[in-house]
Amino acid sequence: MGDTIETEGRFASAMRADAPPAIVLQDVNKWFGALHVLRDINLTVATGERVVVCGPSGSGKSTMIRCINRLEQHQQGKIMVDGIELSDDLRSLDAIRREVGMVFQSFNLFPHLTVLENCTLAPIWVRRMPKKEAEELAMEYLERVRIPEQAKKYPGQLSGGQQQRVAIARALCMKPKIMLFDEPTSALDPEMIKEVLDTMVMLAETGMTMICVTHEMGFARQVADRVVFMDRGEIVESGEPEALFSDPKTDRLRLFLSQILRGH
Amino acid sequence: MSDVTLNAAAASPEAAPRAAPVTSTGTVAWLRANLFSSWINTAVSLALAYLLVRWTIGFIDWAFINAIWTVPMQGNVPQTQACRALEGSGACWAVIGEKHRFILFGTYPYEEHWRPLLVCALFIALYVVSAMRRFWSWVLIPIWVGTLTLIGVLMWGGVLGLSYVPQERWGGLPITLILSTFGLAFAFPLAVLVALGRRSKLPAIKTLCVLYVELVRGVPLISLLFMASVMFPLFLPEGMNIDKLLRAQVAITLFAGAYLAEVVRAGLQTLPRGQYEAAEALGLSYWHKTGLIILPQALRLVIPPLVNTFIGFFKDTSLVLIIGIFDLLTAGKTAIVEPAWQGFGIEVYVFVGAIYLVFCFAMSKYSQDLERDLNQHRRR
Ligand SMILES: Nc1ncnc2c1ncn2[C@@H]1O[C@H](COP(=O)(O)OP(=O)(O)OP(=O)(O)O)[C@@H](O)[C@H]1O
Ligand SMILES: [Mg+2]
């Protein structure tokens, strides 16, 4: 315990004094067997900052953000979330997962529970919130993602866009400080992408700290404070969206951008 | 994966949006479409119909028209000459009338038969209550504990003015119900734990669970029963004796547990990894994740094979006859050892078979309803 506080103290002094960073990755390395998927990743995300991560398929984007809530474990380096270092200690893991919400490409809603139950499950069981209170909270967020009328339905009865908005509401019901998005619109039909992006823009406007893996360049331009470009397990370039997109410094990013633009 | 197939199956009726033409509905149309659509279909339908009618008539002749329902008694000895004169052309139901109490309750003291009868009624009541979804909560636990205790008191006696009946004298249907109910009631939670243990990240737990399943599944139930009845007492300290029924019960529970564990594990494996990840990302603990997300989905998926295994074990309890326990089937066999009734096995086996059938069919029907109700979320 004392150890954590000490590291936190040392760390805070290294950063700007006013706002402690929400997420810090320091020289993070990870291998899947012999495959080196994350190479010396260094990334600091300030509280309230919105970061978009892009890069070609297989470059390690998902792996990186999944390390942040420890769905994957890094093997070298240090990850701090909300001032707590990720380690094998289960209590710190619980604390971190309570503060970090995640939205997946394939929604991963619980199909045997109604939309409302999907949203109230974690507040009730993890935050020990009374059921009635949890339901009121869930309805509030379902209204915010504009699907309160679907609360009693099962996820399988909703469209993809609606399901993803439920997934966002479900994560928000835990009142997280940080939200991670892993290609939230990639599994959606084009006409549904906008409704999900609108929800995310709205969320960004509330000042939420967000890391978002996406290839939606329009979204990146609109809300991102910073875009991070990854390739082959490395962070190759990062910077403000306009600057990065209009003036790529590396060939790899130039190639990637040309492919993305051709694809669209 | 199963999602895909189920959705596909559900989607196909929607593929025909227009109402079917009126001329193609109704009984005649159904018959024409399904039984007489071509000359070969017609031939097969007619042949099968002929056989069906003949067998039905034959069975009715045997079971009802030519059957003998009672036989005269001379002293204590039933006079079965009339039955023998039938030479198999009719059933001799008199054997059931005479022996049904022995078949149902074995050698339990005759004047105390109301006790095992009440026990059977209690078991059935317990099944019915447990089957009703509005009782699905913690209240079931005291109900089960209370009923099973009451059943023990009724069978053993020795308290409340009931005379003591040693376990050796129990027999018939109560034995079958005791072995299968206790067996499955303990085997099922055991199976869930073992199935979870087999997927555990802790090598010790995983190895233990794999060993248990492979060892128990690798030997026939009969040899397990033998071991329980012959070898197990050798390991116990001198003078300590565990009830024979209890030993058989343990063997059956362990055996059923290994099979059910594999069924449950199959269910766990069909769940996509995203379900685990979503639960973890929300901060749910292992037991919350397992109890609220994983098991409810996995078990629903395996209701048919689960009930299949249940039904199999309900019938497999009859194997305890080899270690001298008098279950329903053994009682039936013993009933026709008496010289007067020798040769009337068919009637007795039909009777015993009908009892098994009632229980198994009830299980099967219930599981179909359960599957339909619990998987409603899969339908649109
Ligand atoms: N559980 C795993 N075991 C082994 N290799 C893995 C595993 N998960 C990912 N990989 C590999 O690690 C590399 C990085 O994968 P990752 O999913 O992070 O890429 P990504 O940038 O998210 O790609 P995409 O845009 O396709 O989602 C890939 O080569 C992938 O095959
Ligand atoms: Mg990915």
Image (cartoon, coloured by chain):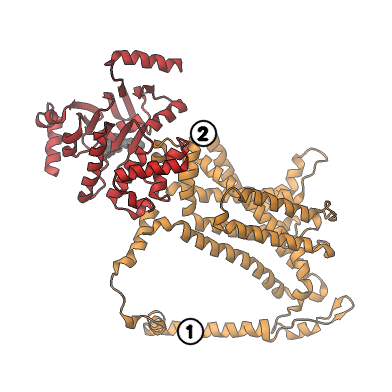
Chain colours: A red, B orange
Residue that protrudes farthest toward the right in the picture: B75
Quadrant of res A173: top left
Locate residue B187, reporting x and y percent.
61, 49
Q: Quadrant of the C terminus of chain B?
A: bottom left
The answer to whether the residue bearing label 2 lies less than 8 angstroms from the nearest atom of ligand 1 is no
Residue A74, image x and y in percent? 36, 27
Residue in the image at 24% along x and 38% along y: A202
> Does the image show residue A73?
yes
Quarter of the view holding residue B39: bottom left
Whether labels 1 and 2 share one chain: yes
Rendered image: mark on residue B203: 2
Q: Local crowd at mark 1 within 10 Å, few (<14), some, or many (≥20)?
A: few
Q: Residue at x 69, y 72 (%)?
A: B351
Please name the amino acid that badge 1 sits on.
Ala
For this view, does B190 lie left or right of residue B87?
Answer: left
Q: Camera-side residue: A105 or B356?
A: A105
- For label 1, the residue is B47
The disc, 1 or 2, on the residue closer to the chain's N-terminal end is: 1
The residue under the point 43% across, 51% down is A112
User: Mark 1 belongs to which subunit?
Assistant: B
Name the amino acid, label 2. Answer: Pro
Cβ–Cβ below 8 Å for labels 1 and 2?
no
Residue A213 is labelled as none
Identified at 36% across, 80% down, the residue is B25
Residue B285, percent across and down? 47, 36
The answer to which of A159 and B294 lies nearer the viewer is: A159
The percent position of residue A167, horizontal first and vertical second, equals 33, 43
Sort mark 2 into few (<14), some (14-19) or many (20+) by Cα contacts within 10 Å. few
Q: Nearer the viewer, residue B305 or B130?
A: B130
Ligand 1: image quarter:
top left
Tag 2, which chain? Answer: B
Quick one: SS at disc 1? helix
